[in-house]
Image (spheres, rainbow, N blue to C red):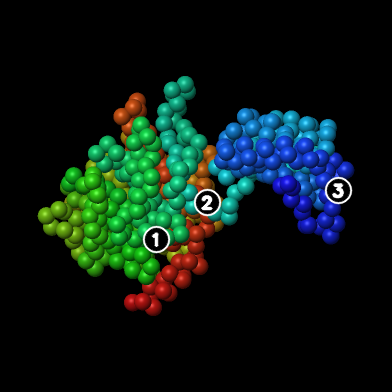
Amino acid sequence: MAIDQSTESQDSTPQSSGLYDTPPPELAERAEHARKELEALGATVRFEAKWWGFEVHLNQAAVDAYLEIKDLLADILGEALKEPLSTLVTLAAMAQKVWVQAVSRGYGCKLVSPWISPTMLIPIGINPSEDPNLWWTVLGRNADTGHFQWNEDTMFPAHASAANPAAAVFNSRLILVHRGFDDQRLWWTSFDPDNGWSVDTEFGAHSSAAGPALAVYDGKLHCVHRGHGSDTKLWHTTFDGRGWSADRPLGAHSSSAGPALAVYDEKLHCVHKGASSDSTLWHTTFTSSGGWTQDTPLPRHSTASNPALAVYGGTLHMVHRGSGNDTSLWHTTYTSAGGWGSDNKFRAHSSLEGPGLAVFDNRLYCVHRGHGNGDQNLWWTSYKPGSGPWTDDQKFPGHTSGAGPAVVVYRDKNGTQDQLMVIHRGYGNRAAGTDSAEVQAQIAAEEDAS
């Protein structure tokens, strides 16, 4: 019998006469049969008696089939609760369907009631201490209202990351690259409109302690990433549609965070922060004929995380968070003729991690996470030259992340309009390069190794 009785109080006996001490055999048998039927669906329902009340735990599969499993839920509750309480609680649970589905967010929930009000059944999400799963959402025009809006967050089937992912469209395929959650290997997946996201595939021998960067240049998809562990060198690999090339180091270019890539003026541009305690931003370019140029420091631009690049209006734009304790976002531009312009601080936009940039609907969009461990919400703002400064920050409706996002414009073969897609990991404090304690430990390890 799956009834857990809590020992949270000195009086460990649940304070209700509505509980069976030992359920009748026929009710126990029906409950066991219900559990087997639920197991066949991948669902679990568990009743836990407490001294103050009780909890009914449901995993996500049970939430997804909530109305369909009503009778099975009734049988499990009937093993624990006497009538008529069992029937009343079952009916009250069914009335909470919308709330239950709203709070579960892919992890299930528990329905909580005190003995003084057993049909209260407050749904509480069963969220782990952190969520390393990858999620995606899109900004598109609502055909009914004509306005742009973000859809609900959707979780990838089995893709997880400890850092920011990277996304790009290559040969009409949407490609996503990310480091693992509890490993530093690089993984990649692609989107097929007919079959959805592919199974995560491990790179041959490519690893990174931070998030990678992607860009399409000269007929290939390029990926640049820092090394794993104490290896702060930057590495470069390409994808030709069939497989990834061997990793090659970028000469004497190194970073303690992930880089940014963009194609501008027929060159592949890479911008990154320095290694260890060097918060300077550095710039290098690549051509297929000449390889990577020497790293050049930006004049007065620095960061504590990965920057973001995008080409807009014939200019290369960069947005980055500040260095040290400065979590403000900063914006600068680059032209081949004039080099890098001055850094301009956003009015009131801050981020603990590096942002994501993309051009959509003739505006430059910046998406970023909040600026402290207490604010892991995703926020967005947009900019158009000649139309004023960056717009006020807007919070996503229920989207959180422990790291920076990937932002890409995509339309599949069945689509009727371009959409701005944001891909991000879930909430949590273990995002690579995010926690100040982790950063300090990482810097110390890198300096000891050098």
Report x, y in % for residue 117.
Answer: 82, 39
Residue under label 2, please give it: 131
User: Residue 82's image quarter?
Assistant: top right
Q: Residue at x 36, y 65 (%)?
A: 228
Q: Residue at x 64, y 29 (%)?
A: 67
Residue under label 1, please give it: 184
Compare marks 2 and 1 and give the one earlier in the sequence.
2
Amino acid type for the residue under numbered disc 3: Gln
Indicate which disc residue 15 carries. 3
Report x, y in % for residue 315.
Answer: 25, 45
Compare marks 2 and 3 and give the one earlier in the sequence.
3
**What is the crowding at mark 1: few (fewer than 14 residues within 10 Å), some, or many (at least 20)?**
many
Compare marks 3 and 1 and give the one earlier in the sequence.
3
Secondary structure type for disc 1: loop
Real-space Cα separation, disc 2 to disc 3, in angstroms: 35 Å
Tell which of 160 and 255 is nearer to you.
Answer: 160
Using the image, determine if residue 27 lies above or below residue 344: above
